[in-house]
Structures are given as C-alpha cells and as structure tokens.
Amino acid sequence: MGNLRKVILAYSGGVDTSACIPYLKNEYGVEEVIAFAADLGQGEELEPIRQKALLAGAKESLVDNLIEPFIRDFAFPAIRANALYEGKYPLSTALARPLIASRLVSLALEREAGAVAHGCTGKGNDQVRFDLAIASLAPQLEILTPAREWSMSRAELIAYGEKFGIPAPVTKKSPYSIDLNLLGRSIEAGPLEDPFEAPPEEVFQITSSIDNSPDEPKEIEIQFEAGNPIAIDGIHMDNVSLIRKANSLAGDYGFGRIDMIEDRVVGIKSREIYETPGLLLLIKCHQELESITLSADVLKTKVSLERQWADLVYQGFWFSPLKNAIDAFIDKTQIDVNGVVKLRLHKGNATIIGRKSLSNSLYLSDISTYGSNDKFEHKFAEGFIYIWGLANRVWASVSKKNQ
Ligand code: ARG
C-alpha cells in the first residue's frame, strides 16, 4: 500500500461507514481519516452525522451541500436522456455516486491524501460506481474498501464500533436497507426478499397509497426548455425547487412507486422497491414532449442510445468516452425540446392529456388533419408506395414462381 497517512472516507453515519474509521486506523495503519458526508437532499440532519465521525475517531469531518449540482449536473441530464435502467428504474441512487466520488477525489487532491475509502460491500452496485469513477478521475489514488474485506456481521460491527466509542444505533433495527436523496428512496431486504410478497405499506414514505391519495384528479402543466424542466403550472422555479414540487405533487397522488427485479452489475438479481415520484413524472413528460419536437429518425436513434446511457450510468461508467459521446448526441437533440406537457394526476396514475410546442412543434395540422383544410398531397402516395414496396413485390413474384 502507498501513502496511507491521510485518507478521505465517504461517510454516511451508518454502522458500516462508522466502523470504517477505527478499522482504517487500526487495520490499515491510516494516521488521519477525513470523513466526508454529502447533503443530497436526503432530509437528514447532517450535523449529528458530522459529529459522529469525530466521535468515531476521524481527524476531521466535512459536510458539503451538493444538492444543486446533483440536480443540475446529474438529475437533469438523466431527464434529458429519459434514463430508465431496465426500462423502469430512473437511477436515483446511481446518479449520486459519481458526484460523491468526484468530491472525494478533489478533497484527496486538495489535502494531499494518498487514498480514498468507502464502506460499500462486495455485493452491490455502489462499490462499482465509486471505484470506477475514482479510477477515471484520479487513477493514482488508492481505494480502500474495508467492508469488502472484514467479515463481520451487523452485530459484530456494532460491537466493534462500541470498542472505539461509536454508540450503537438507538432505534430498533429496521429490516430494510434504504438509500435516499432528493430524487427518491430505494428500499431493499427484509420481507422484500421474497419477490412474490407484496411490499408492505410501511416501506413507502414519500408517495401516498392509492387509498390515501385524493379522490379528485388534478391537472398540471410542466414546461421544458432545451429538454430541462423549468416551470410547473406556469410558475418558473430553480432546479431544486422544481424537483421538490414535482416530488410533492406526484407523491401526493400516489405516482412514482416501482417494484422490480433488477440485474445488478455483479450478476445478482435483486428485488428493489423505489419511490421516485418527481423524477419519474418529469421523465414521462419529457418523453412526451420529444414525441412532438423531435423527428422520427432522431427519436428512434435516441431511444437506443438512452438505453445505453442508463446502462452506463447504472454500471459505473459515468466518466467514460462512450457516455461522453452519447451526451453530445443527446445535448444536440435537446435544443429543440421546448414546450409544455399537460397531465392528470389521479390515484397512482399520471396520464398525459396534452402536449404543445410553440417554437419547435413538428406536428402540423395542415398536413395531419382529416378536415377540409388538408394540405397533404394524396396523389403522391401511390408513386411513393410503388417504390417503397418494389423490393417486396419482386420477392413475392420470385417466390411464387419457385413454388
Ligand atoms: N439498487 C439500487 C442501485 O443500484 C439502489 C442501491 C442502494 N440501495 C439500498 N437500499 N442500499 O442503484
């Protein structure tokens, strides 16, 4: 191992990352652990978390509010990419990892630390995302991953922590593993491990159940500019307020719950529950607006690249040449994605009921109408179909002959 005098640790305040602090010092011989926690809008108070790292023996404990860059540089690009891993998961957890990794790296460079560390286990996706992002940004940095090496159960970890002054968690251990940020919540484990078992209502916190959602539907309008959401019901908002508003609107009406079997990078299928009301709503509206502002061939190409974009982000390749190249394609297309989408929220559904673009609509009523003002030249259809079907007719006549 290289220079392990100083290490920057991604810190969450949980049992694992807390145990990492004494473990790094005692087992790896690290002299100074600098803990770093990010505020990503998870709604947790971060000062107690900052203090806890110090209690656990960190030399310094830093907290950074990264909500604005998280939404601007990670959530909005995901909306522009209509990113849904395996067609379902809008990457709410995955998007946070390259941002945290880049802060770890810049802190390591600023503080001249020889290594960074995280508390991810060997079974998940997050270790892959952290390791790959760190390696792309600063290949010279060593990455320390105690939780991939120790073989302590949760009870053993708590006991280990207590030896070093880390208080045991006060609340009763929930059976669930939860990750949360402003984009949503991810819930795994406990009773959810039976994929045929319906998720108990207690796992949901930011979306209403169908029963508790309002009886009356609500119509809303979302406006986009260059593919970015900018206003809800005509009220312009900054990025973060817009996500918060979309979360509360969609969440109140019970929209944004996902129950899926997901393919992790490490080959495991896992049962995942998500609630990502705002992000899912915005992706749905964005997709709709693209249907009226982008040409058919661009749409078709974009759909296949979107799938790849989501795979890359899920699989840890946020910083990669292919992701950069796909981003360039997407950015080019988004210049035209301007307009408004109207939808109706009701009992878990967000139904699109209208879309318009004042500047970029490719929908022209002159040629699409069935009315009397039709400008479409019907007579050209015959010649078009003659040539369009020529190869097929040749094939049909030859196969008939050979019968
Ligand atoms: N499966 C999701 C992902 O890979 C979430 C992982 C974190 N969730 C958790 N409950 N610990 O992005």
Image: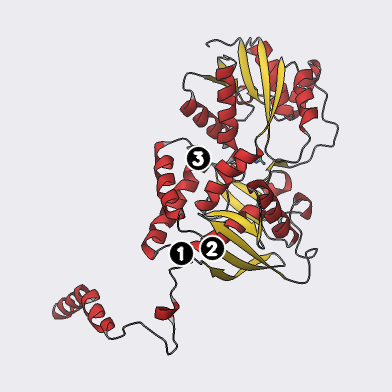
Q: Locate residue 86, reporting x and y percent.
A: 52, 52
Residue 294, by quadrant, is: bottom left
Q: Is residue 44 visible?
A: yes
Q: Hey, what amino acid is under mark 3? A: Gln
Residue 252, by quadrant, is: bottom right
Q: Is residue 275 visible?
A: no
Q: How far separated are the C-alphas under marks 3 and 2?
A: 32 Å
Looking at the image, is mark 3 or mark 2 earlier in the sequence? 3
Q: Are marks 3 and 2 in contact (CB under 8 Å)?
A: no
Q: Is residue 114 left or right of residue 165?
A: left
For disc 1, the neighbor class at 10 Å (few under 14, some 14 to 19, many from 20) is some
Q: Which mark is residue 360?
A: 1
Q: Quadrant of the C terminus?
A: bottom left
Taking the image in four quarters, ligand 1 sits in the one at top right
Mark 3 residue element: loop
Q: How far separated are the C-alphas under marks 1 and 3?
A: 34 Å
Q: How far separated are the C-alphas under marks 1 and 2?
A: 8 Å
Q: Locate residue 30, reporting x and y percent.
A: 64, 11
Q: Hey, what amino acid is under mark 1? A: Asn
The residue at 70%/54% (across/down) is: 245
User: Quick check: 403 above or below 160?
Assistant: below
Q: Which residue is mark 2?
A: 339
The residue nearer to you, when weighing 225 against 171, is: 225
Q: Which mark is residue 315?
A: 3
Of tags 3 and 2, the one toward the viewer is 2
Q: Are marks 1 and 3 in contact (CB under 8 Å)?
A: no
Q: Locate residue 149, reporting x and y percent.
A: 61, 22
